[in-house]
Image (cartoon, rainbow, N blue to C red):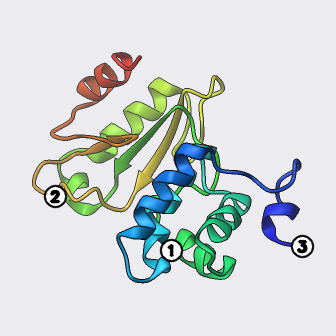
Amino acid sequence: MSLAQSEHPKGPLEFSAKAKDEIKHHVAKYPDRRAATLPALYVAQREFGYVSPAAMATVARELDIPETWVREVATWYTMYNKVPVGKYHVQLCGNISCHLTGADKLIHGLSQALGIKPGETSKDGRYTLAEVECLASCGSGPAMQVNDDYHEHLTVEKALKILRDLP
C-alpha cells in the first residue's frame, strides 16, 4: 500500500484537470521528469493546502517517478509545508542580520498580538506564525514573508498594519 492510500482517509488524492495540465507543462520543459518535482510539489501545495505524505505520493504518481524521490525532495526544502498552515503563513526571519535590526522585537510583538507562538496557528485558522532561518533580506531587515509576499524594514507596528490590511 502506498502512502497515498495509507495516509489519507478517503484513499489517494487526485489532482484537478487544471493542476494536471500545469504539471504536464512543467514536465515538457525538462529532459528528465524528475526535474519537474519542485514545481509539481508547488502545484500540490496549492491544490491540497500542504504537502502531506499522500500529496507526495500523488506527485510521484503524476510524474511517474518513485515516491521515495518525491519524499526526499519535499522534506529537504523548507518552502513546502508538511503540515497545514493558516490562510496567512507569516514567516519571520530569525537570522543574525535581522536580529541585529530588531527581529526579536518583531517576533515577540507579533506573537503577542496574534496570541500564538512561532510554530502555532491561530484558533480561527487565519495565521500561522513561523520563525525561519533566512529570508535573504540581510540588508533590509527585519523581514517577514506572508504567503508569497515579502516585507522588509519592519517594525512591529508596520507588520501589524500589513496583517490587518489582509483580506
In the rendered image, residue 49, in percent from the top left (x then y), is placed at 60, 43
State the residue position of label 3.
Answer: 1
Q: Circle 1 sits on which residue?
A: 76
Quadrant location of residue 122?
Answer: top right
Mark 1 and mark 2 lie on one chain; the one further toward the N terminus is 1
Quarter location, residue 145: top left
Mark 1 vs 3, N-terminal side: 3
Circle on res. 134: none
Question: Mark 2 and mark 1 in contact (Cβ < 8 Å)?
Answer: no
Amino acid carrying label 2: it is Cys
At label 1, the amino acid type is Trp
- Residue 143 is situated, as x and y percent measured from the top left of the image, at 25, 45
Q: CA distance from mark 1 to mark 2?
A: 23 Å
Question: Quarter holding the C terminus?
Answer: top left
**In front here: 95 or 128?**
128
Picture residue at 22% right of the left edge, 32% below the top: 155
Mark 3 vs mark 2, CA separation in Å: 46 Å
Residues packed near mark 3 inside 10 Å, few (<14), some (14 to 19) or many (20 plus):
few
Q: CA distance from mark 1 to mark 3?
A: 24 Å
Left or right, 92 with respect to 130, comes to left
Left or right, 158 with reference to 4: left
Q: Secondary structure at mark 2?
A: loop
Residue located beneath label 2 in the image: 138
Mark 3: amino acid: Met
Compared with residue 49, is residue 77 higher up or lower down, i.e. above or below? Answer: below
Residue 78 spot, x, y in % from top left? 47, 63
Mark 1 Cα shell of 10 Å, populated few (<14), some (14-19), many (≥20): few
Q: Nearer the viewer, residue 48 or 104?
A: 48
Give the position of the N terminus as an image quadrant: bottom right
User: Mark 1 or mark 3, which is nearer to you?
Assistant: 3
